[in-house]
Amino acid sequence: MRIDGKGSVDRAAPVRFRFDGVEYQGFKGDTLASALMANGVRVVGRSFKYHRPRGVLTAGSEEPNALVEIIEDRQQTPNVRATVQEIYEGMEAKSQNRWPSLKFDVLAVNDLAAPFLSAGFYYKTFMWPRAFWERIYEPLIRRAAGLGSLSGRHDEADYEKAFAFCDLLVIGAGPAGLAAALQAARAGADVILADEGVAMGGRLLADSGQIDGKPAGEWVRDVLAELGAMPNVRLMTRTSVTGVYDGGTYSALERVGLHVAARPDLPRECFWRIVAGQAVLAAGAQERMIAFADNDRPGIMTASAIRTYLNHYGVSLGKRVTIFANNDDARQTARDLMAAGVEVAAIIDARPDAPVAEDCPVYAGAEVVGTKGRHGLTSITVRHRGGDMQIETDCLGVSGGWNPLVHLTCHMNGRPVWDASLAAFLPRAGAVPGMHVAGAAAGVFSTAGCLTSGAAVAVQALGVLGRKAVPMELPLAENAGYDILPLWEVKGKGRAWLDFANDVTTKDVRLAAQENFASVEHMKRYTTQGMAPDQGKNSNVGALAVLADATGRGIPETGTTTFRPPFSPVSIAAMGAGGRAEGFAPQRFMTSHSASVERGAPMIEAGMWYRPSYFPRMGESTWREACDREVTMVRGTVGVCDVSTLGKIDIQGRDAARFLDLVYTNMFSTLPVGRVRYGLMLRADGHVLDDGTTARLGENHYLMTTTTAAAGLVMRHLEFVAQAYCAGWDVRFISVTENWAQFAVAGPMAKALLETLVEVDLPFMGCGPVQLDQVAARLFRISFSGEQGYEIAVPARYGEALFRDLLARAETMGGGAYGMEALNVLRIEKGFITHAEIHGRTTAFDIGMEKMVSAKKDCIGKGAAARPGMVGAERDQLVGLRPVNDVAISAGAHLFNPGTEVTRVNDQGYVTSVGYSPTLGGYLGMAFLRDGRARHGEMVRLVDHLRKIDVLCEVSDPVFHDPEGVKLRG
Amino acid sequence: MRITCPLCGPRDRREFYYYGSEDYLTRPEGEDWDAIDAHLHLRNNPAGRVRDLWYHDMGCTSWLVVTRDTVTHEVFGAALVADGGVSISAKMKSKGGAA
Amino acid sequence: MRYSGLKVITEGLFGNKGWKPMWRDPAPKAEYDAIIIGGGGHGLATAYYLAKNHGLTNIAVLEKGHIGSGNIGRNTTIVRANYFLPGNSEFYSQSLKLWEGMEADLNYNVMHSQRGLINLFHSDGQRDAFVRRGNAMINQGDDAILLDREGVREHLPYLDFEQTRFPIYGGLLHPRGGTARHDAVAWGYARGADMRGVDLIQNCEVTGIDIEGGRVVGVQTTRGAIKARKVGMVVAGRSGQVAAMAGMRLPIESHVLQAFVTEGLKPVIDHVVSFGMGHFYISQSDKGGLVFGGDIDFYASYASRGNLPMVEHVMEAGMTLMPMIGRAKVLRSWGGIMDMTPDGSPIIDKTPVEGLFVDAGWNYGGFKAVPASGWCMAHLMATGEGHENARKFRLDRFKTGHLLDEEGTGSQHNLH
């Protein structure tokens, strides 16, 4: 019910929303939880395992019970905390983990079967018969488990990521955080103040206290006005700092559009990476429950949540409230309720010596031992000095004390420290370099203490930042002590919940101890305590205490609890913002891209690049037809292919030649200017890294070509070799891959075509500058097809024009463009290797190039390549394959000796590349075969189980086309 | 994690490529397989302070020797491999000492 | 105590008061026939098979913390046998067979679920590489099915087939691949070993390895000296440090691998899906959480925690491949310490010290290997001879060049 005169929701702004199909009205400023309470809705969810009816427990992001689905058009968001979700006009929410309805949930039968569903019961059964696990048991378990549902549809919404930098990050804008931010900001530091709430102020907004004789809210407004006016301050509300990482890096999640009806101009969330010189953690503390029989009924909440709903939202769930506590703080809830006109039936205070002077009955030394009311609390049973008694009540506020929110201090493996006087874990000093903890997060619970502590740590942080603090006078505020008698559990017969979200009771923890799961980690994993959406925030300390009791140890000896990121759950979409669709990786386009697309070429990914697969012509219905034609065209007339994706590295310096001798297996210092040489490069471990041609453009000037795939790898390798092993050498290099567009012109008429453009006078493997009208171009006589071939390179801005021009000229000669498919067939016919062959496990020996490892000089990888396992007959060696009958063969097939069984032990090798050769009229393959070079002419059996191919092949040299190289040189 | 590149200043870890221990800097010549094993494979791999090699891939393309702690991830400093892995501040100190 | 459905019911009727401890907490004896350092999955499995297969029961497992506190409790629970290099194939094949009999053997439900694993490929070249792998799996006697794009769509209709950066060409389905409940594996082996008389000694850190005349004679621990003439180091994640106690340097660098789990969701992902182009793999646990991970953080670390660049990369990979998971919220992230070897394959071998054995270098694939690793390590420790299925996992293979590099990325510890 609404309480007149209380709360800061805008009563003039009604908001309509739906929950489980029923329309309700709340006000602007309400959360779903407060609005449902105002409407008298008590049951908002069902528990995970026993499907017990559950109501709202808290008023914050730690909520374990009130998890709902927010439904949008064809999309939905599961497991949304009703306590955080602000309502907006037309919002639709749905309860989850129940069937068919929240009121009648079939799986509530689990609650009756609870004795058989004790902790870890599933490890002891469902084993027989074996096949039933996947077919029957597991599907049933999976269907019953889980909470909310994803829609199964792509999340098309917008999410963002951003970086921010500051001197001081203040986490939490309660009294401590505000004081810290003010102190730092006045000293001129760049401050980010982040708070997960809608409004800043923390508990000051939820409590009824005063600061400097004024309502605390007024002080908050004044401070925020001052901070907001300062250019060095950024205030971030609805922003939860979720993780602490190295070097002062913090992650934070900002809810940008989640509280408004879908607006395409707003991202739903923004994931921040904040780099801070120093940080102040002022995250506050969280009230904890006490375990007693049936403590999970709707209507049972934390005492502070009742206060928040009353003071901040103007709502009370109960008409007749009771309080059960072991400390002073919960008294304030009773007082605030009574002041607002809500009846408080009793305060049950576990402390025998608790003060009893209140405007309602107080039972000192008493405990709640039971509750009633399946769909909403109706009464509690209290055990006190005079015996047991029943109290009619529809809302019970519980306070088992406060846990400082130490979570972020644990993200770098720092374990918190037990403080017996506060009965709580406190942050370990120095747990996070550069982070100072203030206020309730540090165990300082009074408002005055928080203000002092916040200002003090800010001064410390300023000191580290090298800034002088400006003296600041702190306002007067409440300075009460914190008197607590630890009470974790009221022992008794019924089930007493610790972890509401995962349905873990004290019995489960005791059973774990009984079965010798005595360490905290064992207990947690065995009972699943702490693994639910609230991440154990509501149960870790209590469960630890019960385990300590069960094993006869103290809490500190039993262990500590730790926390890992994120502080509160973060959507995959927010952390993965930008990765959707093509955003996952850069896209690189050649200058010929649009010309190829215009010709209908399917563009396929080659690393980050897109390259044309083939250029279809009228009447061709399959890629093979186009590919065969393009191969025949290159062999018969002339073809043009964009090869700009190959890595190009410009290398200069007096020691350039010496450097190339070191990185290549073969000699480049002897290469004459104006010539090109094929080079083989090894990794330090002796395997082939890459191959390609390198041209000597001048005495001290080389241009290296790498494969497309290894361009970045080679660049990094060269940088390493140069910087690590070539100190003092005069050699510099830079990638020019994107600066030059380069086109292969191949075929018997290649020279004729080029001569219409430039002067062509190059020997095989020659190179030189050419003038293309006004453009300084480069011409190389190299071939990857086995035909007479040239590559012409121009500055990238002329690439598209040249490509179109070359194609037009080629087409007049009966030639044209060829794509990747034809390129592949051409190189297989010629026995040229690609990364299908040099796949990282092959050596120069394997590919028959051991003679290219110069004996006259050292090179990277040479020694390692000579290890016994890297050479020798037991290694697979590169061969060519042709099927005996003219049938298809396939890459990825394995090879066997005819007559042997097709099993691993008989495996003789595998096929790396296959193509249909229109030139030779059949399939050709390249393969690695055990001791293959000695087996040319032998038959092997090629078996591809997956594609159902099983054929005999003849082993040969891998060079099928023009083995003497007549065409190449002609 | 942030690394202070001697040339570029403090940068996010995502700008850097990690290679491995500084053992890679000692390159044996010839076919001494024990030396190759030590160069490529065998590692002290301490839980504590290490000197390892990072490449400022998305920056100045310098190879760096970074001194850091493998348990706390604290970064103590970075020096250019091309300077023999001696940090600039250390060099300044030694120069100062000589003067 | 034998577990069964009937037992669960009878115990339930009597207040679950009769369940016995799953293992004892014995005090360490002065001497054992063999000691296994490390009470993780591999160490516990080694102890179990030493007792079961070789009748060696006067043995102890020494664990620094509590059993199962290493990577067995910190992984993405994937079980598969889809290797292609001889040496790996037969080992993981044996391991999968042991998984398939594990529940019956251990009388413990480890929830091994053969939900099927699909490795996606995104180019013709990748398809050929996966065909090579699939054929190797079948040659080994395991299962593999090649799926084209439409085949993948039938199994995984929720992938983004239209817009994802690396179009889906198809996938290799490994029907017997799947997941298991990771902690239960440790507990099941622990209980099985304990029942056979093995002493599981927790909170007992080994601080020294005693060697006399080139042979091991015992270990020093935080709970006193313990003698044994056979000692197995089974401490992946900390292998280098334990081996250093015996004066050895290992070909291992420790790296952190992060993993993530979301809040519980109703069933939405049935298979294990692996997306090589994004280094992303995902499955859904029986409890409903999406369990997923990516590549290691790439820098040497013992911190058991990682940094944001890899976190974001993993999430981005998920968003390009299966954007329907966008609204699932990550509940917890964690990091495990990985023994990374220069070729990505493990080591199960003798050491130069007589009686001292090493089982290490599991990179980030140790979980599925637990049963076969225990089996082969037990065989090695009991007989002194390497098991035929682990014959290529030699400690000296890096020096001799007999590498087992499935990824082909070469001698760089963090690239595997």
Image (spheres, rainbow, N blue to C red):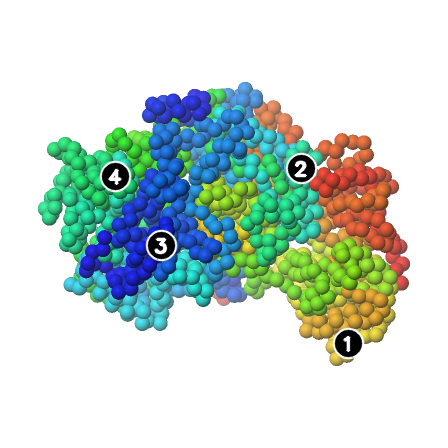
Mark 4 vs mark 3, CA separation in Å: 25 Å
Q: Dot 1 corresponds to which residue? A: A772
Q: Secondary structure at mark 4?
A: loop
Which three-letter amino acid code belongs to the residue tagged 4? Answer: Gly
Asked whether the residues under the numbered discs 4 and 2 touch, taking CB atoms below 8 Å apart as contact, a structural biologist would say no
Residue at 79 percent across and 47 percent down: it is A925
| Label annotation for residue C153 | none
Residue A672 location, x and y as percent?
81, 65
Q: Residue at x 15, y 44 (%)?
A: A345
Task: Judge left or right: residue C14 versus residue A926.
Answer: left
Per the image, the residue denoted by label 2 is C137
Q: Residue at x 43, y 59 (%)?
A: A269
Residue B73 seen in render: no
Task: Assess whether mark 3 and mark 4 are in contact (beta carbons under 8 angstroms).
Answer: no
**Looking at the picture, do discs 1 and 2 lie on one chain?**
no
Residue A373's disc is 4
Q: Secondary structure at mark 3?
A: strand
The kind of residue on which mark 1 rests is: Leu
Q: Residue at x 22, y 65 (%)?
A: A218
